[in-house]
Image: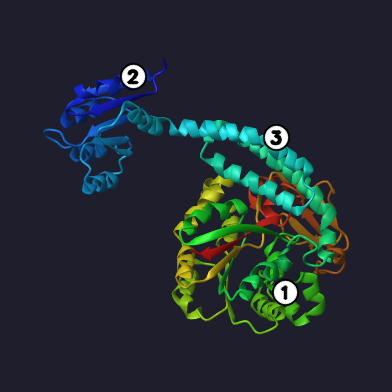
């Protein structure tokens, strides 16, 4: 029989435990026995063990003292305390010393076996279970992909794939990541075809007769909360992907009940277009044509086309609610601004809506291309997700959510667009007036294969603005990115495997809208 693990049992009444030891040995464990703490410490210093079973009441050193010395020598060695003592102080001590388990005598052999199995084999069992569950679901995902005909179908499919991404993160040895990545690529191919065929119809249709777009978000998700007399913290974390949003949810679920929904980012999936659409309820072309003063403010700062958001948001709330809505708008680029907002947050307690735009994740995406440190940390989707999760857990924004719970606010958490790790550099022909985007471009006489990009010759058909005379747009499909023929290989090296946005993909367009209701 293959040895399942090597166990050291430290107990002054070890002879009375012979049936338990034989049972473990029959199950394939190797068990070494000692009758006092000092001998136990000596064994650990000289030999390798996978687990220690430790009595509390022994002559000489008691179990807690032995445990502390063991932890100094080998802090990662799991220890299960087994004792007749049922006093709570001892349980507290055992917990504070981070024991792997605590059992009260008398115990039967199967209890000991179960405790050992959980500690020594839990990872392997979970891996096998995850592998089996995913392989069982593989065909179901394939069926959903073949039958997807509505946006809800694509959302359900994408949501399921993302949940498997997160699940398999902790099961690195299964070898299923590439299989899952293949399914996601297949899903993206189908989704791109679906969007390319339907998008023009959506932007002409009335709200309620199309998927919830960026332009519909405030009316569809925020206004109903106001109608229920809720006070709302409306948080837009720029460039937050679904997987990242799901990763940070456990940190807020202690204080909030969560309902995960989605909306569809407008094209291009970039902040000037998608975030303006959220706060104005309009496409940029409509602002350009119908609101010249707002348009002038939007385009007057070339580096940021979102300067008119506060004014547009106030107008949108007034239009939708039929009255002035007491609200405030705040944008945070760096931590000190976030801390400043947090320190004043309770001053806005009488506001019906507190809108908060957070740029950290978007800045992280943009700076990755310039930082070898960030490239190392954000090597892939899992690294990116883990970094966002760590940031949130230690950020001022986490404290904002805590304060929102104290203030009795409902939180509406969303984003303007996601991002995708790009894999295929596509040559594009363009003139000098062409924009510099990696996943979308606008200019004149743009040329690219329709296989790799949505080619828009008439901007008005897509409710896109004329940013230069006769503006054309290119919007990348799936995981493609645009590279000019000159210095092609240089930019290919810089951009390959980077996270970008602006194009058509599940990751960029299907973005989370999460309602957090205080418990």
Please name the residue that numbered disc 2 is placed on. 25
Q: Dot 2, crowdedness within 10 Å: few (<14), some or many (≥20)?
A: some
Q: Nearer the viewer, residue 3 or 256?
A: 256
The circle on residue 498 is: none
Q: Is residue 121 visible?
A: yes
Sequence-first disc among 3 and 2: 2
Sequence-first disc among 1 and 2: 2
Q: Secondary structure at mark 1?
A: helix
235 in relation to 92, above or below:
below
Q: Nearer the viewer, residue 79 or 174?
A: 79
Q: Nearer the viewer, residue 286 or 446?
A: 286
Q: CA distance from mark 1 to mark 2?
A: 75 Å
The residue furthest top is 1
Residue drawn at x 70%, y 71% is 219
Q: CA distance from mark 3 to mark 2?
A: 41 Å
The residue furthest left is 60
Compared across the picture, whether 210 is left or right of 5 comes to: right
Q: CA distance from mark 1 to mark 3?
A: 49 Å
Residue drawn at x 27%, y 24% is 47
132 in relation to 25, above or below:
below
Q: Dot 1, crowdedness within 10 Å: few (<14), some or many (≥20)?
A: some
Please name the residue that numbered disc 1 is placed on. 299
Quadrant holding the N terminus:
top left
Compared across the picture, whether 1 is left or right of 155 comes to: left
Q: Secondary structure at mark 3?
A: helix
Q: Is residue 487 visible?
A: no
Q: Position of residue 157 (x, y in %)?
A: 69, 46
Please name the residue that numbered disc 3 is placed on. 139
Q: Nearer the viewer, residue 41 or 298?
A: 41
Report the number of numbered marks: 3
Q: Position of residue 413 (x, y in %)?
A: 58, 63
Q: Nearer the viewer, mark 1 or mark 2?
A: 2
């Amino acid at each position: 029989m293959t040895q399942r693990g090597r166990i050291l049992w430290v107990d002054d009444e070890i002879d009375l435990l012979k049936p338990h030891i034989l049972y473990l040995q029959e199950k394939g464990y190797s068990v070494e026995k000692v009758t006092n703490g000092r001998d136990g410490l000596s064994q650990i210093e000289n030999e390798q063990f996978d687990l220690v079973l430790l009595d509390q009441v022994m002559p000489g050193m008691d179990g807690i003292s032995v445990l502390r010395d063991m932890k100094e020598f080998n802090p990662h060695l799991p220890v299960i305390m087994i004792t007749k003592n049922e006093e709570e102080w001892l349980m507290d001590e055992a917990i504070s010393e981070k024991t792997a388990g605590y059992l009260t005598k008398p115990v039967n052999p199967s209890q000991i076996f179960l405790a050992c199995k959980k500690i020594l084999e839990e990872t392997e069992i979970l891996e096998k279970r995850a592998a089996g569950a995913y392989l069982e679901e593989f065909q179901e995902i394939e069926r959903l992909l073949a039958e997807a005909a509505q946006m809800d179908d694509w959302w359900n499919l994408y949501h399921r794939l993302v949940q498997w991404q997160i699940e398999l993160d902790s099961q690195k040895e299964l070898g299923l990541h590439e299989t899952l990545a293949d399914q996601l690529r297949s899903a993206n191919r189908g989704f791109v075809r679906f969007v390319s065929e339907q998008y023009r119809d959506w932007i002409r249709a009335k709200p309620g007769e199309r998927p919830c777009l960026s332009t519909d978000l405030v009316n569809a998700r925020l206004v109903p909360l106001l109608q229920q007399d809720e006070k709302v913290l409306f948080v837009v974390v720029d460039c937050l992907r679904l997987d990242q949003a799901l990763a940070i949810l456990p940190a807020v679920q202690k204080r909030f009940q969560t309902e995960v929904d989605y909306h569809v980012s407008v094209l291009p999936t970039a902040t000037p277009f998608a975030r303006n659409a959220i706060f104005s309820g309009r496409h940029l072309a409509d602002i350009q044509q119908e609101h010249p003063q707002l348009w002038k403010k939007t385009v007057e700062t070339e580096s940021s086309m979102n300067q008119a958001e506060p004014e547009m948001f106030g107008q949108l709330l007034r239009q939708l609610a039929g009255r002035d809505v007491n609200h405030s708008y705040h944008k945070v680029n760096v931590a000190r601004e976030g801390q400043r907002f947090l320190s004043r947050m309770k001053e806005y307690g009488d506001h019906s809506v507190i809108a908060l735009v957070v740029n950290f994740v978007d800045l992280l995406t943009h700076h990755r291309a310039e930082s070898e440190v960030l490239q190392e940390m954000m090597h892939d989707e899992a690294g990116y997700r883990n970094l966002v999760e760590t940031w949130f857990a230690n950020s001022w924004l986490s404290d904002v959510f805590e304060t929102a719970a104290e203030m009795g606010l409902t939180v509406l958490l969303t984003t303007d667009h996601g991002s995708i790790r790009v894999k295929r550099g596509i040559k594009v022909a363009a003139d000098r007036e062409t924009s510099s985007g990696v996943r979308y471009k606008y200019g004149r006489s743009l040329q690219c294969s329709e296989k790799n990009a949505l080619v828009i010759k008439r901007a008005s058909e897509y409710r896109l603005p004329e940013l230069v005379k006769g503006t054309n747009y290119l919007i990348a499909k799936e995981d493609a990115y645009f590279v000019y023929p000159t210095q092609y290989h240089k930019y290919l090296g810089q951009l390959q495997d980077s996270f970008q946005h602006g194009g058509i993909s599940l990751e960029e367009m299907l973005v989370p809208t999460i309602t957090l209701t205080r418990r």
